Image: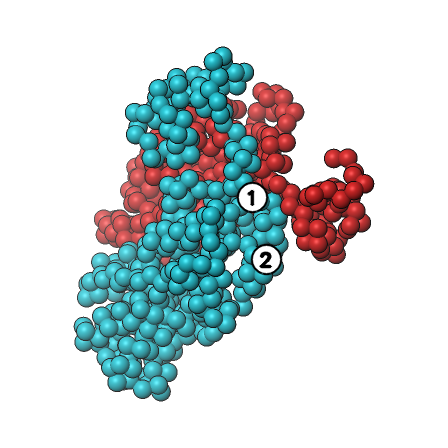
Chain colours: A cyan, B red
Amino acid sequence: MSEKPVRARHATISDVARTAGVSRQTVSNVINAPQTVRAETRARVEAAIEQLRYRPNASARRLRTRRSATIAIRAEEQAGGVSGTIYDRFLHALAMEAGHRGRRILLFAAEDASHEIQQYRSLSYGDDVDALVLTGTSHTDARIDWLVDHRVPFVSFGRPWSRPRLDDPLVPWVDVDGAAGVRLATEHLWDRGCRRIAFAGWPSPSGTGDDRRSGWEQAMRRRGWAEDGLVALRADAPEDIGAAARAVSRLIDGLGPDAPDAFVCASDTLALGTLLGGGRGHPVIGFDDTPVAASQGFSSVAQPLDHVARAVLDLVDSLTAPEEDAGAGDPAARHVLLAPRLVVRDEAAPTASRLWS
Amino acid sequence: MSEKPVRARHATISDVARTAGVSRQTVSNVINAPQTVRAETRARVEAAIEQLRYRPNASARRLRTRRSATIAIRAEEQAGGVSGTIYDRFLHALAMEAGHRGRRILLFAAEDASHEIQQYRSLSYGDDVDALVLTGTSHTDARIDWLVDHRVPFVSFGRPWSRPRLDDPLVPWVDVDGAAGVRLATEHLWDRGCRRIAFAGWPSPSGTGDDRRSGWEQAMRRRGWAEDGLVALRADAPEDIGAAARAVSRLIDGLGPDAPDAFVCASDTLALGTLLGGGRGHPVIGFDDTPVAASQGFSSVAQPLDHVARAVLDLVDSLTAPEEDAGAGDPAARHVLLAPRLVVRDEAAPTASRLWS
């Protein structure tokens, strides 16, 4: 890193800094975190880089620092419903936030959970990544056990439903409080005068699905509903528009004069199915605030995905900090539960719904 | 790479090979392309790796080969409609196929096109990637000019609509023949007896949209329709369910007794809008074969995304081959136009549509 009086065969970062009239740190910033450098300075440094044909070697840099600044995440397969866009949006938010922090996202695909673990093994052997980010946690999730056993740094978006304790400090996670979101939706409908509020959700056991349903149960119980009344107001269906439509249609037919006067749903896919299955005349609230909710004009619970991405990367930073005192620090800070918000649309006169009737 | 008689401080690949009783190449395969190794052999090699705590250093490996085996792609922002899943599915297919070839996908985000170019610059300075994969080409696309000018290896999924010539050998691309897909859909409806087949598409100019519309125009012209008749059968709307519903509703109202008897659409988003805007009693064919098409029971043109991913990676391989004779070879092989197929669903009695009426 010493400044040489004669021009070296390959230009160095010092040559670039001298030519552009900036510090070496500024040149490094232009390369690694360009958004932190003023446009005018950036342009000058880039001109110097091109003029001198300076090529910092990323592999040499990584070797020097023993840190790839890369986090790996699996490319999720397309979900059946309309809520698959959530993973998309999270991935985009994660890539954007990682870029701001000078980190890279390595994307890999896996045929199933055991292939995914195989990929973890290969990635962690190779020192290619600093940490893994998990999505799609479930009750039968061998991945987290493997990662904990092999001491591979990771952060989960989604609570580790497969583990005996959700507050295990060895399993850092960020999640959105689905129960709170659904409770909010249910209370909103109650305040508007609805009383027989049904819930369309996924069959148990489902970590995320059971969590969301519990928010509806809590809100309804607090307002005097008993267990058997709630069971009668439940429609269960997988994440599929047609299946949800049929389940809701059966629910309405079965209840006759006691049919629901409103619906809260575990996803926008189920909400669209609910509209198609006979819920159309009543308020319907979905979950995930997808483009379908916006275009159909129904309310939906929105996940704060930018916030999730920042929290995931904060945890990655803390796990991979060079001087980290592992085991110390506040274990509770390793579990971040974020509040969703309700995006209210005018259930009385949704634009597109009028086109349906 | 010489075999040492005494145990080195760090285990080498030869140590692992000897312990597992396999060749060094097999150990390398287990690390870099595990799917090519039999499960039993793989387990033995992995046991030896763990026993010896062997850690091949990926950065050192890359430095040696001057090749990161990594391709970079931008994380696309969520589209407004239901067809955003196409990018998702392509990304998944690309990651899966890249894994089979021992290549990695580096995902980055960008706020806009100029930020994307900024990222290209940073990625190519750093020697971090072998090639870039572009998506979302348009008529106003500065990215391709930049990549060509800076001799950065890239492959585009989507034709380079912004360039004067689509057959420029400096711009390797893979695309799906949208015109052929829409022609197929139009002919299918004609064969079923439809005669006033309308087209719901995106406003011009749109590379992809104009290409798809041209397939409908070709099919209708061959069957005797003149230009002014076709203009009257066009509904233009952006990629938004509500906007499409309104455009189709206006089209139907405007034509009165001459209303369309079938609809072909540039996307499933527009097809869903068409159903909501009054197309419900008639056959409607979408494009992209999203989960919405499956669950609503309408036919749709499907893009062969696995095939696209393979073709993109074939081009990446040919661009980054060490002994490549640049400029030679068959330029036509750098442009791959793949045929889509029509997924026919029973337009007479789509399951979910019955629930709407």
Residue A113 image-quadrant placement: bottom right
Position of residue A26 relative to residue B198, above or below, is: above
- Do the CB atoms of the residues marked 2 and 1 lie less than 8 Å apart? no
Residue A24 image-quadrant placement: top left
Residue in the picture at 30% in, 39% down = B203
Front-lying residue, B190 or A177 = A177
- Left of A123 or right of it: where is A237? left
Residue in the picture at 18% in, 76% down = A193
- Left of B227 or right of it: where is A123? right
Percent across and percent down for residue A181 are 31, 67
Label 2, label 1: how far apart the Cα atoms are = 16 Å
Q: Amino acid at mark 2?
A: His
Position of residue A163 relative to residue B320, above or below, is: below
* Disc sitting over residue A93 in the figure: none
Q: Which residue is mark 2?
A: A150
Q: Which badge, 2 or 1, comes first in the chain's sequence?
A: 1
The answer to whether residue A332 of the structure is visible from this angle is yes
Instruction: Look at the numbered disc 2 and give the secondary structure of its residue.
Output: loop
Instruction: Look at the numbered disc 1 and give the secondary structure of its residue.
Output: loop
Front-lying residue, A208 or A142 = A142
Q: Chain of mark 2?
A: A
Percent across and percent down for residue B61 are 63, 36
Which circle, 2 or 1, is nearer the viewer? Answer: 2
Position of residue B290 relative to residue B223, above or below, is: below
Percent across and percent down for residue A98 are 41, 44
Residue in the picture at 45% in, 68% down = A166
Q: Which residue is mark 1?
A: A128
Q: Chain of mark 1?
A: A
Position of residue B3 relative to residue A290, above or below, is: above
Percent across and percent down for residue B311 are 57, 38
Residue A180 image-quadrant placement: bottom left
Q: Amino acid at mark 1?
A: Asp
